[in-house]
Image: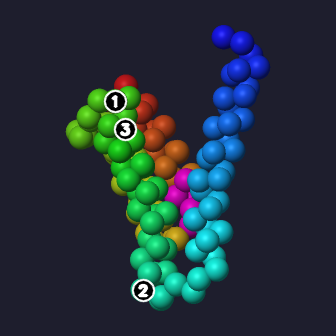
């Protein structure tokens, strides 16, 4: 495949992606949304992130693993607890990495 074609496709996809994402933001920024809609929209990023993380925790490597032998699942528990009580993203990240490494080591 010609490198010029590949780079042209990449540039075209990038431009299309930017336009598709920017147009609704540009249009909606001109309107004052009702408080209910703004509050509802504030939950979208958290929901999307939670869905992505949850899937990786219970299905690492494209295999469902909802068992106590899953270090991803076990590490999610202390991570969630640290975040729940400290509200520190950095603390939760460090706790998650440390607990994952510990569980992976302990489980073999």
SS category of the residue bearing label 2: helix
Q: Does the rendering let one see residue 86?
A: yes
Foreground: disc 3 or disc 2? 2
Residue 4 higher or lower than 39, as above or below = above
| Left or right placement of residue 61 versus residue 8 in this view | left
Nearer to us of marks 3 and 1 is 1
Residue at figure coordinates x 68%, y 31% from the top left: 10
The numbered mark, 2 or 1, whose residue comes first in the sequence reads 2
Indicate left or right for 25 with 64 as reference.
right
> Would residue 76 appear left or right of 11 to someone viewing this image?
left
Residue 87: x, y in percent?
52, 71
| Residue nearest the observer in this picture, 23 or 98 | 23
Q: Which residue is mark 3?
A: 71
Q: Is residue 101 above or below residue 89?
A: above
Query: Please, what secondary structure does the residue beneath circle 3 have?
Result: helix
In magenta, the rendered stretch is 88-93
Identify the residue under disc 2: 36
Question: Dot 3, how many residues are within 10 Å of its Cα: few (below 14), some (14-19), or many (20+)?
Answer: many
């Amino acid at each position: 495949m010609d490198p010029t074609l590949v780079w042209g496709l990449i540039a075209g996809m990038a431009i299309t992606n930017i336009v598709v994402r920017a147009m609704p933001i540009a249009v909606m920024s001109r309107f004052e949304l009702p408080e209910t809609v703004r509050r509802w929209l504030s939950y979208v990023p958290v929901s999307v992130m939670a869905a992505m993380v949850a899937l990786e925790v219970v299905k690492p490597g494209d295999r469902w693993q909802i068992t106590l032998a899953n270090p991803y699942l076990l590490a999610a528990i202390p991570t969630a607890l640290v975040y729940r009580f400290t509200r520190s993203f950095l603390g939760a990240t460090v706790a998650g990495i440390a607990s994952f490494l510990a569980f992976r080591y302990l489980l073999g």
